[in-house]
Image (cartoon, rainbow, N blue to C red):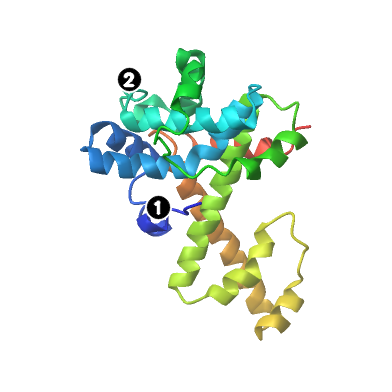
């Protein structure tokens, strides 16, 4: 999958992407065809996984889900699903896309999939088989919760890409690789002393560097999060909700 590197910026200068996710939606509605396709192409690459999981958990087969996901984004690119969009005042982008997806699934488009297969409408590289493990592991999960959980996973990955880009620009790739496990709860904990020996640094300096690394990651995470919110929305509240999805039974 594409990682969005063609639209890189810095977290400190307003985010990894020059446009927020909401401004991409507005651009997709208002811009000439070329710019519109580029903006929506980026949205597709960012958000196909939550869409895929939502559709799959509605009971569609893997093949049907790929078709429906492709057609959903095709209609987004055509502009059919954006006619009522007024901009960031609509609220959370996560909620907006989920509502639009629900509306899409209740119309009669899914009845036309057989005619549309192979019709040259491939919009985004959907790796459906890679998602099937999540379908099996969480078969009882509500479709909306599956959508939101995948949204959260992709958000965390986005923040990590922003952080890696910042460290790479500063010529600190080695520190990024060494410190990355400190923000991954699933990684085995590495002691400051071990890191100090690995990096040839003093233990006290490592503790300071790790603290700054974690702070920098939070800045990147909040920047990624704010890109999906309307003005006035509380990013801390949204973050608490998304993280709570990983603690629910």
Q: Where is residue 66, by image quadrant?
A: top right
What residue is disc 2 on? Answer: 84
Q: Which of 236 and 249 is in front in this view?
A: 249
Outermost residue, left direction?
Answer: 32
Picture residue at 53% right of the left edge, 42% below the top = 126
Q: Report, in whole angstroms, how far the alpha carbon at label 1 lies from the one at label 2.
A: 27 Å
Task: For residue 76, say whether it is visible.
Answer: yes
Q: Is residue 111 above or below residue 203?
A: above
Of residues 67 and 51, the one drawn nearer to the viewer in this rendering? 67
Q: Which of marks 1 and 2 is in front?
A: 2
Q: Could one spot residue 236 in this view of the protein?
A: no
The residue located at (30%, 25%) in the rendering is 86
Left or right of 55: which side holds 125?
left
Tag 2's secondary structure? loop
Q: Which residue is drawn at 79% across and 32% down?
A: 249
Q: Mark 1 points at which residue?
A: 15
| Residue 204 horizontal side relative to residue 173, left or right | right
Identity of the residue drawn at 28% across and 31% down: 29
């Amino acid at each position: 999958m594409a990682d969005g590197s063609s639209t890189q910026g810095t977290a400190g200068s307003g985010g990894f992407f020059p446009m927020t996710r909401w401004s991409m939606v507005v651009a997709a509605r208002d811009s000439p065809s070329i710019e519109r396709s580029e903006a929506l192409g980026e949205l597709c690459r960012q958000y196909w996984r939550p869409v895929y999981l939502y559709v799959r958990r509605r009971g569609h087969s893997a093949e049907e889900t790929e078709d429906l996901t492709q057609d959903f984004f095709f209609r987004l690119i055509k502009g059919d699903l954006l006619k009522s969009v007024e901009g960031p005042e609509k609220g959370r982008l996560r909620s907006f896309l989920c509502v639009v997806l629900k509306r899409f699934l209740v119309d009669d488009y899914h009845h036309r999939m057989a005619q549309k297969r192979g019709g040259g409408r491939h919009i985004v590289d959907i790796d459906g088989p890679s998602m099937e493990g999540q379908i099996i592991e969480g078969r009882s999960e509500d479709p909306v919760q599956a959508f939101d959980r995948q949204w959260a996973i992709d958000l965390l990955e986005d923040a990590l890409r922003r952080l890696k880009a910042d460290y790479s620009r500063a010529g600190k790739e080695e520190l990024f690789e060494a410190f990355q496990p400190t923000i991954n709860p699933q990684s085995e904990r590495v002691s400051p002393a071990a890191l100090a020996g690995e990096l040839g640094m003093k233990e006290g300096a490592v503790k300071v560097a790790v603290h700054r690394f974690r702070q920098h990651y939070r800045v990147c995470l909040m920047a990624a999060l704010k890109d999906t919110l309307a003005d006035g929305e509380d990013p801390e509240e949204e973050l608490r909700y998304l993280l709570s999805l990983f603690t629910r039974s």
